Structures are given as C-alpha cells and as structure tokens.
Image: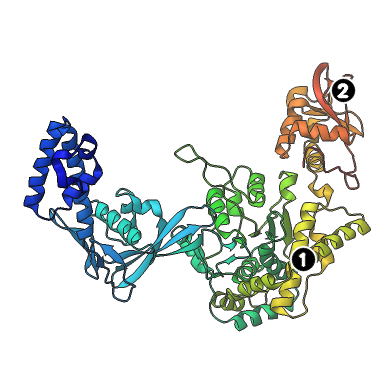
C-alpha cells in the first residue's frame, strides 16, 4: 500500500494511478481529505504538486461518473401486454415516458413507444428499426431508417405517422430510443428484411416468406397490402376455368404471361412486354384484372398501375415488384406523355433504371427488376416510326372482333372479391420442382419455336422467341399445378404472334416509310409540266426512272428522322443490301441535276422487295 508511508513516496509513486485509487477507496471523507493533504505536501517536496493536482482532478471527475452509473436507476417498461424492456433512467408506462433532470421532469413522449426489432436489409446492407407505439387506444408500427431516430432534426418526421414528437421533445425521444436499444441487445431481435418483392435470394419469395420482413410499406403501402389472399380460391378457380373453356387466346396468353413473370429471373432472361390491343368494350380490362388477380387485389387503385404515372414512378414500382408482373391498363395515356416511346419500352425491358446522384454527389442504388409487363391499348403499341429494337421487346396480341366474355360484369364481380391464391400456389410448386426441370421445359419450347421458323422459312427474332418460350413454359406449369383442365396454348398460334426479322428490321421499316412518304408526295418528285411554274411546289427530289428515285439530302434526312431512324445508320444498311447508288468516291450521296441546279442527293431503288430479303441482325440497327 503506497499510502502507508507517504513521506517515502517518490515522483513515480505520487503520479501513479494506483495511489489515486487508494485515495478514493478511503471510505471516511475526513480521513480521505487528511491523507490527500499529506500527499500534496509530499508532492510539493518533490516539485510535482501541480501535476499531481491535475491528475487528481481528472481522476475525481471520472470516479464521479462511475459512481453515477453504479447508482443510476434501471427502470423496466410497463406497456401492458408488451414484453418488458430495460429503460435505464426512463420511466416508461402507458402514461408516457419521462425522466428526472435538473429542471424537473423531462418527457420523451406522451405515449408508449419502443424499438420492437432491428431490420437488416439484404440488398442495401443498411439497417432499419421497427417502432411500435400506442396512440388512440391501439398499437401501431412503422419501419424507418435508423438514421431517422438518430437526430432531433430527422426524428420529427415521425409526427406524420401519428407519433407525438415535436421540436421540444425530439432530443429526449432520440436519447430514450438510443438507451432502449443499447440496454436491450439481448431482448430486441434482429431480422433480415427487404424492400422488394418476388425472388430475393436463396429461393426466398416475398411476400410469402415468414422469416423475411418487407421494410418498404411506408413508401408503397397500398401496393404491398394489395398482394394478399382474399375471398375463396375455389370461386376464383371455378370462374377462371369456366372462361378458359372458351379457349380465347387473349385470356390464355395473359394468364400464362402473368405466371411467367416469376420465371424470368430463374431462367435468367430480360423482362418483356405483352400488349393486348383492340377497340373498347372487347374485354381487355377484365382480362387484365384476371391476370392481376393471380397475385393481388385487381380492384381500381390497388395493384394495377395508374396509367397516369410517370416513368420515374414506374421505375420505383418495378423495383419493388421485382419478380411480380407490372400490369398497366391503357398504356396509351403514358405513351402520350413521353417524347420517345421507344425509350420507355427500352427502359421497361432493360431490367434496370437510370443511375442517379445523391445530394452528397454519390450514386443512389440503381433500381432493377426481372419480370413481365402486361399492358392494354386501343391501338397497336408499335408503329412504323418506333425503333426496331423496341418492337423486338413487345409481343402484341390483337383482340378478335368478338367480345372475349359473354357476361364480363359477372366475371369482374367474382374476380374483385376472390384473388391472390393462384400465385401463392404456383410459387410453392415452382420451388418444389427439381432445379433442371424448369430449364428443360423452357428449352423444349425454345427449340420448338426455332424449328417452326426453319420449317416455315419464317425467321423470327430471338428476342421474340425467348419470351414466348417462357410464356409457353408458364402455361404448361399453370395447367399442371393450378387449372388441371387439359387446356393449353397452341404453339403454332403463339408462333404466328411473333414478329419476323423483316418486320423488326429498322432498315426495312425505314425504307418502307420512305417509299410511302414519296408515294404520298409524288408531285414533289415529278417534273413540272410546261403550264406549271417550277416554284409552285417545294421539290424534294425527282424520279429518275421506273426503278430509281433521287431524294435531295436535307429532305431525305428529315424523312428518315420521321421514320425514327438515323441517316448514317440507314445509309450503312442500304449500302449493305445494295439499294443505293454511290458516287465516284464511294459516298452515299451523289450530285443530281434539278433543272440546271445540282444538289447532293440519295439515289435509291424504288421497288425493292423487302418481303424475302435476308437481313443480317448484326447491322447497326440491332
């Protein structure tokens, strides 16, 4: 013991931590102060009194903190039927949460609130907390980013969810929730969570997994809550099977495409669009409702996407749906909002959104999805001016003249009240299948469609064949696991829905558009008669003979742009298929005389037969 012989202490002893501990272990305040003065006298003799006093003061402050912690009360929450949690200095019961401060009672919240669980997001690797609180005589819960409850500025946002937090009690509430979490690491459980639906890794499928929590209800609550099982599965099944007996391709393909959405990721392919188009009153909306009811509530304002949404909002929705189908009624309303509809098609079928920066100059997580998009339109989604690559990604289905349903109102009434069962059962069946079987079935249909193309001499695009092979796969599995009625899609009928390479070739489509434009403006290419003034019409070019036409450069460029193509790409393709004349230097535009005026023009064949041309898909339009 150092303090037994104070007068024999050396400099090292005086400034040691052991000596300070011995001083503070003296229980009598009088004896401690008396010994302290002896030590200070010895320190003065050794000329280290100032250093000793500084160490003593610092040690004294730390010692007081230790005593305060040891003496700190350790209250337990008393929230009726909720599990008790250690709350430290906070008294927490059904009347609210408070502690004593030097200014009296300090309230953290006027009602019960606590951290129920910690959620670790599997995609973002970030952490959220689930808060449970008692307001208006009922328990509610909310999942928020952990950073929301980490500062008095951000925690005020919880007020919009009914939690009574203001700028006055925000700081205390932050401290209380921090203490609750720190004091109850053994009581507050952790769970894996996700902000997406469908396949989320290791064979897990949301929202059908009990051990994975969906943590994004705050942003897409209506969508998430619509994906439930409601009503009677038997009533839904009887209704749909009765309609399947009519063997209308519109219903059979939309059913199969909806099921196919959850096969896109397991089969490792890109998203695709199935569009049904035709006049009003044919039953398109009811068919979309039936396809939606496989997974969710088909009523208005629930699962089906509002056609007035923006492309950015659609990206967010697609990211959440992930594997589940995006269903849109009347896509034309969105089409009319965007400048380049081809780019929207590319976006939907790319499987990923645009990269965006954060306020801190970082990059936000890119949205992604692997599913099928089901849409309805009154007119064909594709057009002569749409880029070939975009057309490639759309399987179009034209409604027959005859109505799809005899009693559409009765069908819709049943579907509105009974939904969500078939998707659950289908996913469970897929999960139980041997791993290779799904791939083998899809490959069988893929090979079948390619063989049809070879036998018929009607070459189809692979980006059309692959989605159709998945639709046929889903149709086969849905009949096996869900309907068991022996009704299946006819592969030959499905093959006819696929576009041929010439239909999709951007070069062929631009050429046809060019010839149609010239034909409808033929007077701009004819030589003026003697009775006409040459300046009467704006001249675009001239017919050279029955086989060739010359188009003045600037008008050619405009027509090709109106066709949705690019001059440079089109001319490259045109040279490859040998339908334009080159000048002496090999350039695509040559000098042509117009009544004495010489202008650089494109000279192109007028009657080139596009129907049987073998178009190389590696040309610049792919």
- Measured as percent of width and height from the top left, residue 569 is found at 77, 34
Residue 11: which disc?
A: none
- Location of mark 1 (residue): 436
In the rendered view, tell whether residue 196 sits above or below residue 227. above
* Residue at (76, 74) in percent of width and height: 247
The tally of labels here is 2
- Location of mark 2 (residue): 586
In the visual, does 276 lie left or right of 318?
Answer: right
Q: Quadrant of residue 237?
A: bottom right
* Residue at (68, 53) in percent of width and height: 381
Q: Residues within 10 Å of mark 2 (few under 14, many from 20)?
A: few
In the visual, does 483 lie left or right of 225?
Answer: right
Residue nearest the observer in this picture, 599 or 302: 302
Q: Earlier in the sequence, mark 1 or mark 2?
A: 1
Q: CA distance from mark 1 to mark 2?
A: 54 Å
- Measured as percent of width and height from the top left, residue 533 is found at 77, 23
In the visual, does 124 lie left or right of 273?
Answer: left
- Measured as percent of width and height from the top left, residue 622 is found at 77, 42
Q: Quadrant of residue 597?
A: top right
Mark 2 secondary-structure assignment: loop
Residue nearest the observer in this picture, 161 or 537: 161
Residue nearest the observer in this picture, 128 or 498: 128
* Residue at (30, 61) in percent of width and height: 163
Residue nearest the observer in this picture, 247 or 491: 491
Q: Please name which of the two marks, 1 or 2, marks the residue nearer to the observer.
A: 1
């Amino acid at each position: 013991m150092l303090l037994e012989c104070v007068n024999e202490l050396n400099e090292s002893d005086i400034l040691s931590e052991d000596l300070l501990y011995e001083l503070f272990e003296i229980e009598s305040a009088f004896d401690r102060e008396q010994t302290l003065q002896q030590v200070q006298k010895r320190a003065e003799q050794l000329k280290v009194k100032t250093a000793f006093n500084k160490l003593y003061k610092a040690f004294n402050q730390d010692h007081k903190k230790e005593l305060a912690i040891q003496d700190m009360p350790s209250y337990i929450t008393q929230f009726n039927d909720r599990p008790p949690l250690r709350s430290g200095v906070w008294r927490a019961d059904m009347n609210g949460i408070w502690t004593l401060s030097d200014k009296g009672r300090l309230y953290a919240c006027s009602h019960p609130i606590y951290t129920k669980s910690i959620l670790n997001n599997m995609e973002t690797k970030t952490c959220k907390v689930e808060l449970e609180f008692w307001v208006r005589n009922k328990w509610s819960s909310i999942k928020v980013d952990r950073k929301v409850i980490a500062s008095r500025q951000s925690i005020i946002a919880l007020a919009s969810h009914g939690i009574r937090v203001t700028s006055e009690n925000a700081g205390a509430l932050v401290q209380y929730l921090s203490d609750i979490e720190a004091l109850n690491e053994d009581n507050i459980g952790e769970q894996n969570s996700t902000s997406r639906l469908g396949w989320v890794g290791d064979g897990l499928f949301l929202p059908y997994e009990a051990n994975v929590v969906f943590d994004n209800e705050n942003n897409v609550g209506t969508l998430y809550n619509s994906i439930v099982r409601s009503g009677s599965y038997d009533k839904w099944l009887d209704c749909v099977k009765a309609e399947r007996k009519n063997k209308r391709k519109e219903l059979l393909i939309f059913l199969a495409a909806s099921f196919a959405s959850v096969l896109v990721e397991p089969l490792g392919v890109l998203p695709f669009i199935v569009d049904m188009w035709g006049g009003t009153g044919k039953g398109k909306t009811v068919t979309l409702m039936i396809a939606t009811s496989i997974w969710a509530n088909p009523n208005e304002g629930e699962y089906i996407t509002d056609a007035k949404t923006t492309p950015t909002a659609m990206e967010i929705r697609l990211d959440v749906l992930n594997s589940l189908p995006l269903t849109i009624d009347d896509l034309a309303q969105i089409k009319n909002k965007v400048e380049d509809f081809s780019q929207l098609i590319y976006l939907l079928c790319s499987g990923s959104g645009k990269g965006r920066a954060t306020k801190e100059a970082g990059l936000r997580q890119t949205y992604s999805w692997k599913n099928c998009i089901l849409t309805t339109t009154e007119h064909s989604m594709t057009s002569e001016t749409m880029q070939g690559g975009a057309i490639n990604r759309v399987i179009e289905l034209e409604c027959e003249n005859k109505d799809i349903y005899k009693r559409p109102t009765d069908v819709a009434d049943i579907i509105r009240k009974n939904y969500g069962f078939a998707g659950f059962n289908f996913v469970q069946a897929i999960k139980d299948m041997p791993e290779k079987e799904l791939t083998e079935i899809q490959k069988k249909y893929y090979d079948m469609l390619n063989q049809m193309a070879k036998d018929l001499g009607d070459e189809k695009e692979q980006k059309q064949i692959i989605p159709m092979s998945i639709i046929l796969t889903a149709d086969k599995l849905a009949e096996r696991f869900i309907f068991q009625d022996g009704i299946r899609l006819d592969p030959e009928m499905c093959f006819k829905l696929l576009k041929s390479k010439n239909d999709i070739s951007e070069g062929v489509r631009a050429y046809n558009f060019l010839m149609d434009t010239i034909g409808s403006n033929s007077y701009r290419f004819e030589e003026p008669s003697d009775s006409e003034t040459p300046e009467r019409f704006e001249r675009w070019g001239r017919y050279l003979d029955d086989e060739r036409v010359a188009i003045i450069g600037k008008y050619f460029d405009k027509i090709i742009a109106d066709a949705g193509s690019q001059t440079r790409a089109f001319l490259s393709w045109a040279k490859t298929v040998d339908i334009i004349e080159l000048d002496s230097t090999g350039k695509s535009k040559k000098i042509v005389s117009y009544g004495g005026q010489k202008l650089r023009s494109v000279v192109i064949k007028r009657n080139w037969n596009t129907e049987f041309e073998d178009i190389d898909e590696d040309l610049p339009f792919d």
